Structure formats: C-alpha cells, structure tokens
Image (cartoon, helix red, strand yellow):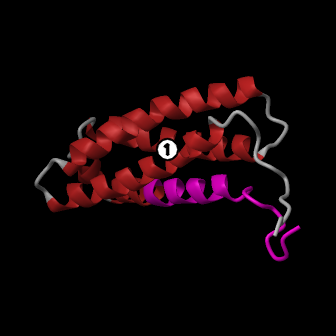
Amino acid sequence: MRTGTGSGRRDIPVVWGFVAVFCLGIVLIGFLHTPSAAGRTLFGSVGATTVVVAALVATLLATVVALVASASPGVRTMVALLVGAIWAAVCVLAGGSLLVAHAPNFLTGLLLAGGAVGMGGLLTTLARRRPLPSNSSDRG
C-alpha cells in the first residue's frame, strides 16, 4: 500500500464534484443576488436558475453514487443519464452566455463551462464499467 494516500483513486469523483459545485454555486449566487443576470441568459431567469439548481442537485447525487462502491450498474447508468441530460442543458446555457458581448454574461458563461467540465468528469467516472478501487497497492 502506498504511504500517505491510502484510498487510491477514490478522490476523483470528489474533485470533479467540487469543481462543478464551486462553479455552478457561484453562478447560482450571482443569479439570486442579481436577478437581471439570470434574465440575460439563453433560457431566461426562471429557466436558467432551474437548470443551475438541477445541475447542483444532480452533481451531488452523482458524486455520492460514484463514491458508493456497492452501487449497482443500473443505478450508475440511470444517474449517468440524468446527469448527462442536465449537463447538456448546462452546456447550451454556457455556450449562449459565452456568445453574448455583455461582459457579465461572458463571466457567467466561463463559470458555467467550468461547471460543465466538472459534470463531464463525473460522467466519465460513472461510465466506468468497474467501480473505483477501495485501495491501491504500490508495485514499485
């Protein structure tokens, strides 16, 4: 066993989940603090806020499912499909915000793109055919 690490690759879903929640959380705070910011997005105020909240909830769910070694392949697949659908909406929202010349929308688009990258990392973790190892051994 490697000294100091102990858990091998078990932290990968947590890292991707943190990236997604951090970026999407900042966007949600911006939308709630300045309602006109959400109104300037592609889906409008209610639609954009709904997508971001759904993405946050799906990200937390995906992180938990990716960490649970005993999760069945069917559960992992269903969560991956849910996250994939919401991830697509986040990508569309990010693309729409990045293409607008207004500076706050561009920053929102960058943060949404960061959230989409984190969600994509979780999707990759969920799509693995085998669960993450609970520990690793050092071969050398």
Residue 41 seen anywhere in this rendered image of the structure: no
Queried whether the magenta region covers residue 46, the answer comes back as no
Residue 39 position in % (x across, y down)? 24, 44
Quadrant (top left, top right, bottom left, bottom right) of the C terminus: bottom right
Queried whether the magenta region covers residue 3, the answer comes back as yes
Residue 74 position in % (x across, y down)? 72, 23
Residue 24 position in % (x across, y down)? 45, 53
Q: Residue furthest right?
A: 1
Label 1 crowd (10 A; few <14 / some 14-19 / many >=20): many
User: Is residue 44 rendered to the left or right of residue 74?
Assistant: left
The residue that appears at 30% across and 41% down in the rendered structure is: 93
User: Is residue 10 rendered to the left or right of residue 55?
Assistant: right
Q: Residue furthest bottom?
A: 4
The residue that appears at 51% across and 46% down in the rendered structure is: 119
Q: Quadrant of residue 77?
A: top right
Instruction: Report the label total.
Output: 1
Label 1 amino acid?
Gly
Quadrant (top left, top right, bottom left, bottom right) of the N terminus: bottom right
Which residues are the magenta region? 1-24
The residue tagged with tag 1: helix, strand or loop? Answer: helix
Residue 50 position in % (x across, y down)? 42, 37
Residue indicated by mark 1: 120
Q: Quadrant of residue 131?
A: top right
**Looking at the image, residue 84 lies above or below residue 102:** above
The residue that appears at 40% across and 55% down in the rendered structure is: 114
